[in-house]
Amino acid sequence: MDTGLRKFIFRDLQTIEGYIDPPDALVFLSLLQAQKNSGLDGGIAEIGVFYGRSYFLLKKISDGDRILAIDLFDIGQTSDGAPAQYGRFLANGQRLGLAVDEDLIIKGDSTLMQAEEIISRVGRTRFFSIDGGHMLQHIASDSRLATDTLADHGIIAFDDTFNPAWPEVTVGVADFLRERKDTFSTFCMTKYKTYVCRNEFHEFYLNAIAEAPDLLAFDHVETEFLGSKVARLHNPISRRMVYELMVRSGMRALSERVYR
């Protein structure tokens, strides 16, 4: 375990408004480290930045890799009527000491983009996070874009796959996997995210999840999803309650111990 990175995940990262929680942050960490340890290089991309919680996580873990981020950046307003989201995103980076590479930030609609716009900036991607629009057409378009940029060993992380508030995400991810069953399969699922890779790397990533020191605290439940063996990381409600109680009691700095 890297105590510095865990401290960042459980303390610093949680000061940014956003949705990636510590369990998935630890999955991101474990997968990116497994790739690095095996010499599986490539760029990193994400659709859906919000205020940068996942972006700065990726930036902290990747240690110099090029990270491209796509978002409309149209949330909130400043006093002059301009969107406030981008300014808050940049400010979060300054506060964390993780400066944003603005040349790799695309303000726009991901469904209108072509793969070459990503590849020309960061090369083939080893990790692609999809958390943009949550309607079926968004998932279909964003998954095509990710597929077209992906390195052979690349991973796609789909957010909100089984969130009842966004049922079309579930349909979109299932469509993606059914249509590409000869190429892609799921290897890991959490409460919020589904992790997908090319079939030839399925066992590699399944083993990476099983052996990751930072994931030993979770119950590893073997299941099947659309024909592929999947490690479902179960985070018991008792642990989640203890974690939330510690955070709300001002013990965020110690909350990391719950996930050891």
Image (cartoon, helix red, strand yellow):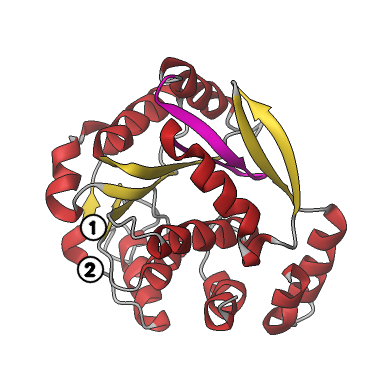
Marks 2 and 1: CB-CB under 8 Å? yes
Per the picture, the main secondary structure of the magenta-coloured stretch is strand
Residue at image coords 32%, 71%: 90
Q: Is residue 126 left or right of residue 220?
A: left
Residue at image coords 75%, 62%: 217
Residue, disc 2: 101
Can residue 47 be seen here? The reply is no
**Residue type highlighted by circle 2:** Asp
Residue, disc 1: 105
**Residue type highlighted by circle 1:** Ile
Tell me where residue 8 sits by quadrant. Answer: bottom right
Magenta residues span: 182-198
Q: Measured along the vertical axis of the image, is residue 247 above or below residue 157?
A: below
Residue 225 image offset from top left, x and y in percent: 63, 26
Can residue 175 be seen here? The reply is yes
Is disc 1 placed on a helix, strand or loop? Answer: strand
Is disc 2 placed on a helix, strand or loop? Answer: loop
- Residue that lies at the very extreme toward the right in this rendered image: 238
Q: Does 206 lie within the magenta span?
A: no
